[in-house]
């Protein structure tokens, strides 16, 4: 029955507007007739059916309008994102990942951006869920991976430089991701980067043998995994060990609470202790002040990310930022980079 409902729903959403209206009105008329028949037990005259029939037709028209509105909205999102991919409106920004002790950059997180020709910059928290609903998130990620390979290929990077790329749970469990990573590593083979795929804890990975096989092949290629937004979901030790995560990226809400009333530092302590026991490295996101950096460094965390060190920036901004750090040979944390366009 559930499968029948899904098929019917997809058929309606893919049908022309007139067909949706007719289907909705016919459905409502049939339901109306059934209710009237049951209530009157076939004693009502035909004249008595006129008002219920009119009401059913109006209800059908309203239902058809609602279905068409949903269909048009979904189709609009699909078309806009697909058009954006064709016209190369999507691009990437890079946010530095640094050491807690000195603030030196050891890698970046790659972040998706969209410059719409009419609406301007669209926040990623809007278009990423839309791309997932439209079934275009894998195509978008593959496009962005090609952008990363082309752009970082123009830079001089230290060996072992971490390149973190966000992917959806659905992408990680397909064999497409193996070819995507192989291509990126091939393009950047002379850079000796450390590719890290970041999967959010907010969406649990489904444990299937084929999915686990994909992860094993990625590991054999040298690709590492990070559980992003750690603390926002319900990952336990079994989950972490089953998928073989190498990093935990702690949800930034824990950092923003540092120094505020009610903050419980023992939560961060427990995360670090448990991660160490499992052989995982920990990255803390959302660091925005010197005080937060000092606190986390004193607690023993190794890797940090946040506006205090650098905002997401274009390749040119990041190149200047990184080369300035190398040239300065400073041991003090860097000030935050200027706000990049579109962030």
Image: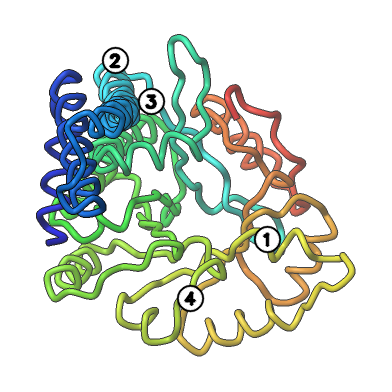
Q: Residue at x 42, y 53 (%)?
A: 159
Say few, some or many: other residues with alpha carbon within 10 Å of mark 3 (under 14 / 14 to 19 / 20 or more). Answer: some
Give the label, 4 or 3, closer to the camera: 4
Disc 4/disc 3 C-alpha distance (Å) = 32 Å
Tell me where residue 256 sits by quadrant: bottom right
Q: Earlier in the sequence, mark 2 or mark 1?
A: 2
The picture places residue 111, in percent across and down from the top left corner, at 47, 40
Disc 4/disc 2 C-alpha distance (Å) = 39 Å
Q: Which residue is mark 1?
A: 253
| Label 1–label 3 contact, CB within 8 A | no
Q: Residue at x 29, y 34 (%)?
A: 52
As drawn, the label of residue 87 is 2
The picture places residue 34, in percent across and down from the top left corner, at 18, 48
Q: Quadrant of the C terminus?
A: top right
Q: Residue at x 45, y 83 (%)?
A: 236
The picture places residue 199, in percent across and down from the top left corner, at 39, 59
- Name the side, left or right, on which 193 lies relative to 126: left
- Name the side, left or right, on which 212 lies relative to 96: left
Tell me where residue 183 sits by quadrant: top left
Q: Residue at x 26, y 70 (%)?
A: 206
- What secondary structure is found at the residue carrying circle 1? helix
| Label 1–label 4 contact, CB within 8 A | no
As drawn, the label of residue 234 is 4
């Amino acid at each position: 029955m559930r499968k029948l409902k899904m098929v019917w729903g997809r058929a309606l959403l893919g049908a022309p507007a007139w067909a949706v209206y007719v289907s909705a009105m016919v459905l409502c008329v049939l339901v109306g007739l059934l209710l009237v028949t049951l209530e009157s037990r076939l004693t009502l005259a035909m004249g008595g059916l006129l008002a219920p029939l009119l009401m059913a037709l109006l209800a059908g028209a309203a239902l058809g309008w609602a279905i068409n509105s949903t269909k048009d909205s979904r189709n609009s999102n699909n078309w806009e994102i697909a058009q954006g991919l064709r016209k190369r409106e999507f691009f990437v920004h890079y946010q530095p990942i640094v050491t807690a002790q000195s603030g030196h950059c050891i890698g970046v997180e790659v972040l998706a951006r969209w410059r719409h020709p009419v609406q301007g910059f669209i926040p990623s928290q809007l278009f990423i869920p839309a791309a997932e609903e439209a079934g275009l998130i894998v195509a978008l990620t593959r496009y962005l991976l090609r952008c990363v390979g082309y752009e970082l290929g123009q830079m001089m990077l230290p060996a072992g430089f971490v390149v973190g790329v966000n992917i959806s749970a659905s992408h990680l469990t397909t064999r497409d991701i193996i070819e995507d990573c192989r291509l990126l590593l091939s393009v950047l083979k002379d850079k000796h980067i450390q590719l890290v795929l970041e999967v959010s804890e907010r969406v649990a990975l489904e444990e299937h043998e084929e999915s686990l096989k994909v992860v094993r092949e990625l590991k054999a290629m040298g690709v590492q995994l990070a559980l992003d937004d750690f603390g926002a979901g319900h990952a336990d030790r079994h989950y972490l060990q089953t998928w073989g995560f190498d990093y935990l990226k702690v949800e930034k809400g824990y950092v923003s609470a540092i120094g505020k009333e009610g903050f419980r530092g023992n939560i961060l302590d427990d995360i670090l202790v448990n991660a160490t026991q499992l052989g995982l490295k920990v990255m803390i996101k959302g660091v925005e002040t010197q005080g937060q950096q000092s606190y986390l460094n004193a607690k023993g965390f190794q890797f940090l990310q946040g506006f205090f060190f650098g905002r997401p920036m274009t390749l040119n901004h990041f190149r200047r930022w990184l080369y300035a750090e190398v040239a300065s040979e400073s041991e003090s944390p860097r000030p935050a980079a200027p706000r990049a366009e579109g962030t």
